[in-house]
Image (cartoon, rainbow, N blue to C red):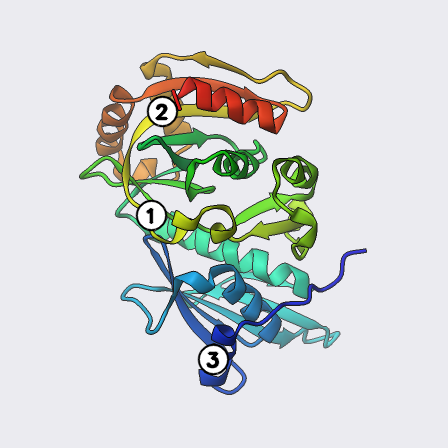
Amino acid sequence: MIGWPLQIVTSRQEAVVRGSRAGCDTASFRIGVVPVTIRSDDEGAFRAFCDLYHEMRLEEPAPESIDVRVRRTRNGKSLRRRYEVWADGARRFAVWDRRSILPHMEWSINWHIMLYLPRYYQVHASALEVGGAGVIFPAAPQSGKSTLAAGMVQRGARYLSDEFALIDPETLELAAYPKALCIKEGSFSALEATGVKMATLPVYLKGKKGAVRFIRPDFLSTSATTPRPCRVGHIMFCRYRPGATPEVRSISRADALLRLARQSFNFVKFRSAGVNLMADVVRSAECYELTSGDLGRTCDLVLRTVGA
């Protein structure tokens, strides 16, 4: 049975609560290159977010910080409790179950990055650093990117993101957005086998994805809070097939360029400049198609392929 998770509150989090306005807890964070300020009427959701990102907390809000607000409301007819999640003044989600608040806070931040963070070219991919080179795994939703990223970090890769590959147009370097990894219920056992103690983490609800758990970045890698930019050295378009033998094959750079365009969030905004940018990225990268199956064997195959 899924219940509302008990949150362990650190002394740092208690200080945040004491210093916040009455009825609305407030804290600011810098998650890699993404500054975020959280304001919440729901103390449980606030403390859950603080627990995920307590190593990234700021004393003061950063300029251009994404403002995420959780508001408690009631349905006008039934008077049933409802929780609204807002980002920079726009209501993004309304949920009825308190277990859904944290996933939708994360979702709102991702949505805002996708729409309003124009500095970076954005590819829907998990991103890691292996041996000093960036490795990105572009893929459609439900392709196992987050699970693969967690498994790779357990084998020594440095974690950059599990949602966005943020590429600086000027340097062609990957910028880090080391958000908490959102793992679906079907991947819990696979990660348990790699040594991640999933059973100890609270369970939340995320729309059609169902039950999910969040892995704190610093649980996987001590360098997650001090990320460094790196150039893309390897691009692996991944797809998960249950029970499949992991396999990787080389693809042409022209093929990779077309696939990257399909997995880009802001291709239309960059237009021809985006084509030139991605051409420069693939020109200096090795490009592959990865079929993943067993997590451990897939991670070993990736590491052999990138030469680590």
**Which x, y percent locates residue 84?**
57, 67
Could you say whether the residue bearing mark 3 is in a helix, strand or loop?
helix
**Side of 228 where 29 appears, left or right:** right
Tell me which amino acid carries mark 2: His
Q: Residue furthest right?
A: 1
Say which mark, if any, is on residue 15.
Answer: 3
The residue at which mark 1 appears reads as: 227
**Which x, y percent locates residue 299?**
52, 27
Query: Which is nearer the eye, 281 or 232?
Result: 232
The residue at which mark 2 appears reads as: 234
- Above or below, 223 relative to 263: below
Say which mark, if any, is on residue 160.
Answer: none
Could you say whether the residue bearing mark 2 is in a helix, strand or loop?
strand
**N-terminal-most mark, 3 or 1:** 3
- Above or below, 178 relative to 135: below
Crowding around mark 3 (Cα neighbors within 10 Å: few <14, some 14 to 19, many 20+) is few
Labels 3 & 1 near each other (Cβ < 8 A):
no
**Side of 237 where 241 appears, left or right:** right
